[in-house]
Amino acid sequence: MKDEEDMEDEEDEEDEEDWLKKLNMNSVKYENSFRQLIVWQESKKLTLLVYECTKDFPNEEKFAMVSQMRRAAYSILANIAEGNSKRHYKDRCRFFNIAVGSLNELDCFIEIAHELKYLNDENNKKLLEYINKTGHLLHKFIYSQKR
């Protein structure tokens, strides 16, 4: 036996389906997805690598350097995504330039972490390769917005 809540949930689902049909939204796709951007995809790889490399940092750095490095890394991703959603050149580039700033911040932390021996040479090299690749792609992407 169905109770009132179950019946209301079914009605809500039916209302949503009707609403989508009326708007012909069943086949609408989000075309302007940031996920298609190579610069975002490479930034995501960098972010995941930062998370992997920082998981064994000393406990006293958990809420300091680790937090800052991770925040800078996902700020790159978030600003590329948000900038990509803007229609006007100045709005788009403002977010992309914030991503560049976050990339530089992350680069700074990587250097300090390596000097403090929190990062071994291999992980430092990998991170710097991703920093350089992401930076190159991001600058090219910003330049491409001017057209």
Image (cartoon, helix red, strand yellow):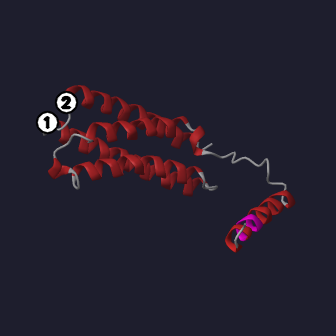
* Image point (13%, 40%), residue name: 116
Toward the bottom, the furthest residue is 4
- The residue at which mark 2 appears reads as 120
Q: Position of residue 40 (x, y in %)?
A: 50, 40
Circles 1 and 2: CB atoms closer than 8 Å? yes
Using residue 8 as the reference point, say whether residue 145 is left or right of it: left
> Residue 117 got which mark?
1
User: What secondary structure do most residues of the magenta stretch adopt?
Assistant: helix
Q: Where is residue 99 in the image (x, y as percent from the top left)?
A: 43, 49
Q: Is residue 11 magenta?
A: yes
Magenta part of the chain: 8-12
Q: Does the magenta stretch include residue 121?
A: no
> Residue 140 got which mark?
none
Viewer-closest of 135 and 143: 135
Residue 145, quarter of the rendered image: top right
* Image point (14%, 36%), residue name: 117
Counting the numbered discs, the total is 2
Toward the right, the furthest residue is 22
Q: Which amino acid does label 2 sit on?
A: Asn
Disc 1: CA contacts within 10 A as few (<14), some (14-19) or many (>=20): few
Quadrant where the image shows the C terminus: top right
Residue 3, quarter of the rendered image: bottom right
Q: Which amino acid does label 1 sit on?
A: Lys
Using residue 90 as the reference point, say whether residue 54 is left or right of it: left
Disc 2, SS: loop
